[in-house]
Image (tube, rainbow, N blue to C red):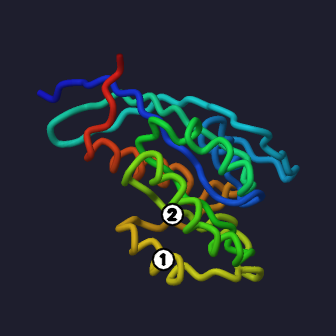
Amino acid sequence: MAQTREIRTKICLIGESGVGKTSLIRRYVLDIFSDKYIATFGTKISKKKVRIKTDDEDAAVTLVIWDIIGHKEFRELVKDAYFYGANGALVVCDVTRRITMDELKGWVKGLFDVTGKIPLVFLGNKSDMPESAEVKKAELEMFAAIYNAPVLMTSAKTGDGVEKAFEILTERILEKGGKEED
């Protein structure tokens, strides 16, 4: 019989302003979406409890999800406090704006400077707008391969891929040992 393990893990969403980090979190945690742009000032923390089942265990996982303002200047000011203790990250670009993919290297470097190498999942968000896409999945996959990380195309608007993204990241964190709840 599988034993249940209680785990609390911190994950961060990283990427430029306007890529949809806050919308992805709202879709995942509350299952809602708004077309209205809501700028994140500083950080916002959300929580969601999930169950992950593997062959040898059943884990009750509390995801502590950190959202941060997407401006580079702010990232440099608060990265130590924001990234400290993170067990994994969703690395988000907006497929309709190439510059947001180009900036991901800086976000990952800032993260790894504080956390060391932790599990990542790269997201090409706004996949519901293929007519406006400037970034193809294959390009994002080539970039993510540098970090040995999977890629998912997501849409906070339709919900496509959102739950799967958090699920894959959580599984990758658990494979690395996760963080036991105190």
Residue plotted at (52% across, 32% down): 64
Question: Could you say whether the residue bearing mark 2 is in a helix, strand or loop?
Answer: strand
Which label lies toward us, 1 or 2? 1
Q: Amino acid at mark 1?
A: Phe
Which of the pair 118/76 is nearer the observer? 76
Instruction: Find residue 72 and report its image quarter.
Output: bottom right
Residue plotted at (75% across, 55% down): 71
Q: Is residue 149 left or right of residue 40?
A: left
- Among numbered discs 1 and 2, the one appearing first in the sequence: 2
Q: Which numbered marker is on residue 122?
A: 2
Quarter of the image with the N terminus is top left
Residue plotted at (38% across, 50% down): 116
Quarter of the image with the C terminus is top left
Q: CA distance from mark 1 to mark 2?
A: 9 Å
Instruction: Find residue 6 and report its image quarter.
Output: top left
Instruction: Tell me if residue 146 comes above or below residue 134 in the rendering.
Output: above
List the single residue furthest toward the right: 36
Q: Are marks 1 and 2 in contact (CB under 8 Å)?
A: yes
List the single residue furthest toward the left: 1
Q: Is residue 142 left or right of residue 105?
A: left
Percent coordinates x, y for residue 169 in the rendering: 42, 50
Percent coordinates x, y for residue 41 in the rendering: 80, 40
For disc 1, the marked residue is 143
Question: Could you say whether the residue bearing mark 1 is in a helix, strand or loop?
Answer: helix
Residue plotted at (55% across, 44% down): 12
Percent coordinates x, y for residue 84 in the rendering: 49, 37
Percent coordinates x, y for residue 19 in the rendering: 71, 60
Q: Amino acid at mark 2?
A: Phe
